[in-house]
Amino acid sequence: MKKVLFVIGSLRAKSFNRQLATQAKEIIGDRAEVSELDYSDLPLLNQDIEQPEPSSVARIRKAVSEADALWIFSPEYNFSYPGHLKNLLDWLSRPVIPLDYATPTCINGKRVAISGAGGKAATANCRAKLTELLTFIKADVLPAQTGIAVPAEAWGTDILTLTEEQKADLSVQAQQLLG
Ligand SMILES: Cc1cc2nc3c(=O)[nH]c(=O)nc-3n(C[C@H](O)[C@H](O)[C@H](O)COP(=O)(O)O)c2cc1C
């Protein structure tokens, strides 16, 4: 059974992106084993603490290495991705053996799907910049994406309800991810 690792780009308890991930998990159903990456204990990247590898970094790199694919669900912060998500991807981009740039990193060649829920732009700017960053760090970014412009009423209720079309977009992503 394939393993899919979800990465939620929001730390907020009622996060719309976490709700989007829950919907995606339902769509994947029993076609894969889905888990969520907990990166809440990841330190800010500082080259002074790269070696020895911090235990949280080792745990996260292992989870990424063992996954067949990642699915990122991220909000847009100021026309881009949130800083904590950049910090995670910076850690994943670094060589595990100091100065060894020949051995592939754990994100190298990894299939990654990108989705996001946010304001009117439906996270288009965040997704474009995430695509650029992930491509630069040699991940295999899948072409299909899902962008959700959170409807006005949801900002009051904190509940994100998806349209059938949005669910269909997630289904296409799931197919690419598992194909
Ligand atoms: C620092 C910050 C910057 C933001 N900038 C944007 C933005 O550029 N575009 C946008 O659509 N929403 C922006 N938002 C609003 C987020 O889309 C909104 O808070 C969203 O609910 C966050 O996702 P979450 O519900 O998964 O936490 C910003 C929010 C924060 C906290």
Image (cartoon, rainbow, N blue to C red):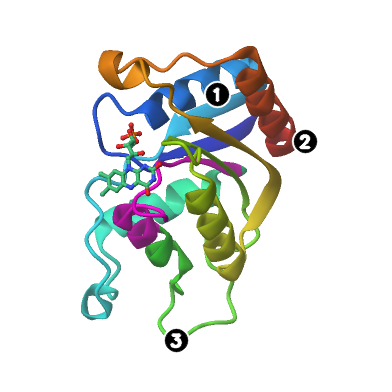
In space, the residues marked 3 and 1 are separated at their CA atoms by 38 Å
Q: Residue at x 55, y 24 (%)?
A: 24
Q: Is residue 80 magenta?
A: yes
Q: Is residue 140 left or right of residue 43?
A: right
Answer with the quarter of the image where residue 165 lies. Answer: top right
> Disc 1 marks which amino acid?
Ala
| Quadrant of image for the C terminus | top right
Tell me the residue that label 1 is attached to.
Answer: 24
1 or 2: tag closer to the N-terminus: 1
Q: Is residue 43 above or below residue 31?
A: below
- Numbered disc 3: secondary structure: loop
The stretch of residues the image draws in magenta is: 69-88
Is 155 above or below relative to 104? above
Instruction: Find disc 3 in the rendering and name its residue.
Output: 99
Label 1 SS: helix
Q: Report the disc number at residue 179.
A: 2
Q: Where's the N terminus, which quadrant? A: top right
Q: Is residue 89 visible?
A: yes
Q: Is mark 3 within 8 Å of ligand 1?
A: no
Q: Residues within 10 Å of mark 1 (few under 14, many from 20)?
A: many
Badge 3 density bin: few <14, some 14–19, many ≥20, Cα 10 Å: few
Q: Residue furthest right?
A: 179
Identify which amino acid the numbered label 3 is placed on.
Leu
In which quadrant of this rendering is ligand 1 seen? top left
Q: Report whether the residue tagged 1 is closer than 8 Å to ligand 1.
A: no
Given residues 60 and 29, the one toward you in this image is 29
The span from disc 1 to disc 2 (Cα, nearest Å) is: 16 Å
Task: Say which of marks 3 and 2 sits in front.
Answer: 2
Left/right placement of residue 171 relative to residue 87 reads right
* Side of 8 relative to 1 (left or right): left
